[in-house]
Image (cartoon, rainbow, N blue to C red):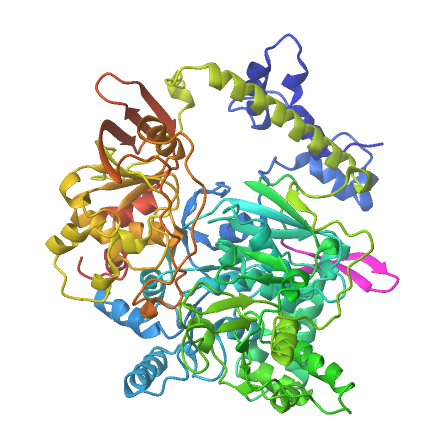
Amino acid sequence: MTVSLRVARLLGQRQALLRSNIPLRAAYQFSRPLASPRAFCTTSSRYETPDVFPSLREGPAANFLSTFQQTTKIPQTLTEKIVQRYAVGVADGKVLRSGDYVTLQPHKCMTHDNSWPVALKFMSIGATKVHNPKQIVMTLDHDVQNKTQKNLKKYDQIEEFAKNQGVVFYPAGRGIGHQIMVEEGYAWPGTLAVASDSHSNMYGGIGCLGTPVVRTDAASIWATGKTWWQIPPVAKVNLTGVMPEGVTGKDVIVALAGLFNKDEVLNHAIEFTGSDATLRSIPVDDRLTIANMTTEWGALTGLFPIDSVLHGWLRMKATDAAMYGSEIKDHHQQQFLHERIDKLFSATGIVGQQTGHIFQPALAADKGAVYAKELFLDLSTLSPYVSGPNSVKVATPLADLQTQDIQINKAYLVSCTNSRASDLAAAAKVFRDAATKNNDQIPKIPEHVNFYIAAASLPEQRVAEDQGDWQVLLAAGAQPLPSGCGPCIGLGTGLLEPGEVGISASNRNFKGRMGSPDAKAYLASPEVVAASALLGKISGPGRYETPAGYTGVQCGEGDGIIEEERMMTIEDMLEKAIKQADAMIESVEGAVAEKQSISPPSEPKNAESLTEILPGFPERISGEIIFCDADNINTDGIYPGKYTYQDDVSREKMAEVCMENYDPDFGTKAKAGDILVSGFNFGCGSSREQAATAILAKGIPLVVAGSFGNIFSRNSINNALMGVEVPKLANRLREAFSSPTPSPSQRDMQEPSQNRESLDSPPPAAVAQPAQAKQLTRRTGWMLEWDVRRSTVSVQEGPSGAKWNVKVGELPPNVQEIIALGGLESWVRKEIGGTL
């Protein structure tokens, strides 16, 4: 049997491991350089094409022989590959990986009701003309029921701005922006699209890398076509089995968010994988639902592969556009073209007995790509799930809730998550099935229940009307709302009143999100929402049957594939062996590290990877550590909400109230030049930029945390505040000054007050302080120095304490430039030739 070149190379990279006379750690160090070509070499490559008959250089053997001349390529995840396509200014030959900062030129950028605030920021920067009008999409979808003069004026301003700039515009009532992005083909497989809204993750359902940006980023893209991004760690979520009858995509994501509810994927990019059989069982509409709610799970993206299911969906859309078109889908025919789809797939030359020609995607994750973590969920063991009340981290099997006789007051089939035509059809089927037991009459919902419906877009509503599903729901007593976000974000008709219970097919059920904070909100599939509306209590349509011998949901870490069922190629087996070897090496290295002092020997200088420092940018930043000993310090704790919408707050006042809601004594303890250090998920919550600018106003140049909330990270760099993640430091400070075992728990999350202007922002987690913590804010006497060039942080634990250092993420020149110029707005001014 012939072993492929890739196998040979993998073996070659590990050949030092086979030398028994070399210590394990040394052998591992020896193995890595062998994968790279030597700088000076006079001998022929060992992998050059072997001497063969000329005839073998043609025909089927040619492709195999050509692999001997291929250079070794660093495997990439699908996320990394897409970012590589849309990153600009990347050095030749550099392969982008998780953790890299890049300058992004996204394929599309969507803004919604916040288009006018973005436009004001755009104009305040000095920009007058959108860099690339074809890159921008504007929609009106959030507050479409609001007919006040103020809101209508804002809508008119947005429409007029779009018209003057030549930007595509969709008016109120046309649909929710994310749905428009998908159905009109702006979000396209293999591309990268951003939106000033947290649910842009939804585009991942069709293989488009979608991620949210804040308003300053959007203004930067309008003005220059570019913004910055740090590639997140990528988590692989392997789906196995096939969903049973009665289980939907909504159940999948509700279960994932509830079963993995310890922030396992917080600020990660997610890639969903699975066997062909599993993925064929998940239609595109279900994928869109799952990807949409990866936001609530804590992720920055949720990406499905470009596969045969997507191929069929795209062909259907292109055929529909060519044959029928629509006066509503005004850009539909321009996007869904068979010629464009052909570029996404290539024919394998194999013809399936039932499927016809078999195609493979032109873009997919590489074998051997490195993932930060791997989780699995066996779909065949899943049952209908319900989220809540008031938290996506609480997910309960429907069967358990049905026994509790939970009466409801309101039901909602709205939002970009689950109000497409297929969802409306699933809900209508509940009433049609009930009609068979009601003399073929559509039954009415109880008088004490209000059932609200709004299609994800006008075209989706038209499809539902053509199929009769919309009429069935109206006949049952459902109240129609305009296509838009509405109750999902707590705007318009049908909000939850104090003491009420609601169940919704939307994506977010934080306390107070859909109305009163004294109400209870649950999330479920369209079928369960419809059945609950019909019966007046949380119920299902009865389609799911528990299998005999059922033992519960199977999920956990790893890929979830039983070894006996795993079909492995030689390469797969070799990769498994290599992973096992790497794990063994890491365990040995870890054991050695535990025996080392806190001051490990520094690496040889010739082994250092140095970061280029721009002229004038500080090479080192140092100061005394002031420690805020808590996790989940949210943006309201950093900068009080009562000041957020006051435009006349002075810099001195911002410094005075900085961290006031977290600790009123912070202002008297912290000094200019201090290094602020905190726990994990620092800066979670709303998107207020003052959380960063208030810290700068206090004279603090650097924030160090175990981890940051993503929106705070973006706002920090956008406003020239530097931040570094050093989990070891947060834990070490706690060892020295508080409980050795910090509490991982988080309390129920609440919507911050006066947060209506940040409709796309998730609410903060409640502050979780370690048990027995002595002080909220502490001057430690420890000194910290960040060496930007060497990407290291050094800590001196007091005058006579230990000194140690740790490697941290790189701050590359493109981000240095933004900070040095005073933030993203100043960078944009420079790019467009304005005055700084």
Tell me which corner region of the image, top left, top right, bottom left or bottom right, holds residue 609.
top left
Q: Residue at x 28, y 43 (%)?
A: 722
Q: Nearer the viewer, residue 696 or 789?
A: 696
| Pick the front one: 32 or 309 | 309
Residue 117 lies, in percent from the top left, at: 29, 71
Q: Residue at x 78, y 34 (%)?
A: 570
* Residue 644 is inside the magenta segment: no
Quarter of the image holding residue 124?
bottom left
Quick check: can you spot residue 343?
Answer: no
The span picked out in magenta is 344-363
The N terminus: image quadrant = top right
Residue 286 position within the rendered picture, expressed as x and y whole percent measured from the top left: 64, 66
Farthest-out residue, top: 21
Front-lying residue, 833 or 634:
634
- Of 577 and 186, nearer the camera is 577
Residue drawn at (60%, 67%) of the image: 524
Q: Note whether 414 is above or below 197 in the view shown.
A: below
Left or right: residue 672 compared with residue 73: left
**Which residue, as the protein is rendered here, is positioned at the far front?**
404
Q: Quadrant of the C terminus?
A: bottom left
Percent x, y of residue 521: 50, 68
Tell me the chief SS of the magenta region: strand
| Figure quadrant of residue 459 | bottom right
- Whole-percent x, y for residue 51 in the image: 77, 29
